Structure formats: structure tokens, C-alpha cells
Image (cartoon, rainbow, N blue to C red):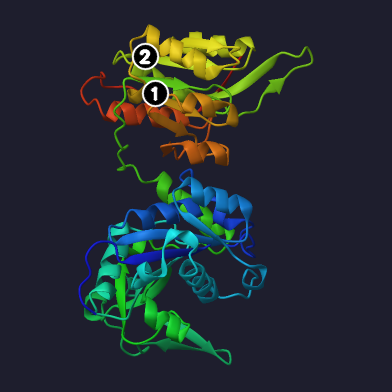
Amino acid sequence: MPETAGPSAIVIIPARGGSQGVPLKNLARVDGITLVGRAVQAASAAPSVGTVIVSTDHDEIAAEALSHGARVVVRPAEIAGGTASSESALLHVLERVEAGDGGLPPQEIPPVTVLVQCTSPFIDPADLDAAVRTVAEGEKDVVVAVSETHDFQWRIDDGVASPVGHTTEYRPRRQERAPHYRETGAFYVMRTDGFRESGTRFFGDVGIQPVAPEWSIEIDEPRDLWLARQLVDQDVDASPEPLDVDALVTDFDGVHTDDHAYVDQDGTEQVRVSRGDGMGISRLRRTGIPVLILSTETNKVVASRASKLRVEVLHGVEDKATALRGWLTDHGLDPARVAYVGNDVNDLPAMAVVGWPIAVADARPEVKAQARIVLSRDGGDGAVREVCDRILASRPGEVAPGAGTAQAPAVTG
């Protein structure tokens, strides 16, 4: 196959609503992002990928896929059960694309088809891109993601344990053993015509794409999900992606809070907030960047929290878009350089006013669909801190060192 120029692959992500090991697994979150969202983001970031399509039978998964920029093909019930193969979903998507679905005319169906699985939450786009190019340039018909291992393996036959690839008499040192490779399940890259002809992900000349063993976890049961979350919690080297804006506006309920309230016997409401969010706002204020809390909520808890954070507040506002435009005019701000963080449908008009509409991780699907950025943190659980850190990352040196990073929640009335 001759070398191709530009995007040469279509990525198809099967994402059923049913899951035997982890209920609604594809909507489970790792580092604040759903598994289907992580798969879409990784695939979209590979330069050789032109189109990302999620095949699903579940409305919420479809909405989540759309919010991350993927296209969606509805998966028929007959190929959405627990015994249906991933190949059946891929073939169905290709048929629908060929029929005109997904916005691709038949002559533009890419020469490379990629199966990406949501169960692998840590796909490196560079690994995926390398695999696609290997197939696109005709070096291999299929490339599968694998991780290197030097483990001593055993198997049981009729109750008797026996070594695999070594003997009990001779156990060479690691550096003396040839590595072998474990299939990770993250991605399978295939020539489109060969896949459609064979109906299986393995045909012709098969190659491998090694990926980092420490990130090659595959989520099949609750313990795997727990382990994946532990891995990202320990990743202290990640730096926030800069967000260069001149002002930050946020909703209150569902952004500074988890959208729940505590009500005592007298009807007094209290909300749960994050100390980490407060620290983020404090550090942002030191740069001189204006911060506004804009809320339809009339409860005095909103003003109380804004006073505590020492930021401006407009609450009890029914028309948030008009109020926001007035505030921007009063401060001489260019709407294109302002961020608004929301979580629910009443935020949509205000989000349309600014250049940087942002959604918290657990926002409504409609809000995610309008957002330019979807945060990795939920409302009340570090979302405000996350956006503050991103704004601060665009202004290095403007904040005095020594600010803490505490994330413990607090209750304020």
C-alpha cells in the first residue's frame, strides 16, 4: 500500500450500555473523565486519525461521546448483547458510513480501521498514531497494542502445574530472557479492506505496538477500576494545560458545590464546598484576574461563599446572559477572552456569551456539548481549582509561591 498523506484512519469505539463486570462501565470515571470520553480524546489526539465514531445502544453513552467530539452510530439490539463481538459493531459502522451516515461519502472511507476499547483508559495517542502509520504505509496488515513482560508464567493441566517458556531446572535472569508480550486490548489497527473481507481483527501480516506496561491496565471488574483511579491519583508530574483568559465567571450550585444541600429542621441550607477550590480562587485573585459568581440561586449561602472567597457575586439572577453582558461591559472585558464554568441547562445562555464555555466533569450532556473544555473534576470536588490552575499556568511567575494544595471539603452556611 502506498504511503498516505493526512488522516488515514477511522476509529470505531464499541461502547455497549450493558456490562457484566462493572455496571455501565463505559460511563465510569477515571480522573474525572468517563472511560468513553477518555477513549474519544485519545483517538482524536492521534494526527493520523480523521474520524472517531462511537457505536452504542445507550442514550447517555451517546450523549457523552458527542460531548467529547465523536460521532455516534446507534448499535442495533441484535449486535449489542453480551455475546456480540466487537467485529460485528465495526462492520455495522462501516456499512452505515458507506451508506452515508457519519458524514463520510463512500469514496472517502479511510484505508485504515481502528478498534479502540474503552476498557483501556490510558491510551497514548503517540502509540496509536505509530500503529496507524505502520498499517497505512503497508508495513503490516494489522497492528495490536501489547505490553512487554518478562514474567515467569505457569499453566494448569489436569491439576498439574507446568512452566511456560522456561523450565524448573533452568531459570535465566531477566536480562537473559527474551521478552514476550501481553495483548492489552487498547487498540487494534487494521487495513479496512482486509478487515471487511476477513471479518476478524487478525489477518495477514500481524505486527505489534508496544505500550508502557505501567499504563496498560484493562478494566474488566471493579478492582481494575479502583486500580486505574489509584494510578492517576499518584501521577504528580502532570501539569495543567494553560488557559489564557482575562476573567473567570462561574455558576455556584453544581460548580462550587456538588449540587446537593443540607437542610436542618428550620429549613436553613448548608452546602459542601472544596477548600482546594478556595485556594485556587485565592491564588487567581493575586494575579488581578476578575472573578464573578453568577447564580440564579437566591439563598444567602451564595453571597456568603463569595464573601469568604472575596470575589464579586450576582445571585438571584433569572437572565444570566444579560447580567453577564452587563458585568463584562462594566469591567471593559472582551467576551472572547472570558471563561464561564457551568453545569446545568440554565448556564447555556451565559456560556454562549463568552469565548471559553467550560463544563464540570459531571455536567449535563447539553452543557458538555456546548463546552469548549470539559474539566476532569466534578462540581464541588476540585472543578474550580482545576480551571484556576489552568489559568495560572498561562501566567507563570505572577503568583507568589507557597500556596497549598489542600482538597479537603468544608461546609459553609
**Residue underneath mark 1:** 280
Q: Is residue 391 visible?
A: yes
- Disc count in the image? 2
Q: Is residue 177 above or below residue 279?
A: below
- Identify the residue under disc 2: 290
User: In the rendering, at what x and y percent does residue 76 appear?
Assistant: 63, 67
Residue type highlighted by circle 1? Gly
Q: Amino acid at mark 2?
A: Pro
Location of residue 101 in the rendering, given as x and y in whole percent from the top left corner: 50, 62
Whether 30 is drawn above or below 356: the answer is below
Q: CA distance from mark 2 to mark 1?
A: 13 Å
- Name the residue nearer the viewer: 279 or 93: 93
Q: Residue at x 60, y 75 (%)?
A: 84
Residue 112 sits in quarter = bottom left
Nearer the observer, 147 or 91:
91
Residue 199: give x, y in percent of width and height. Answer: 48, 83
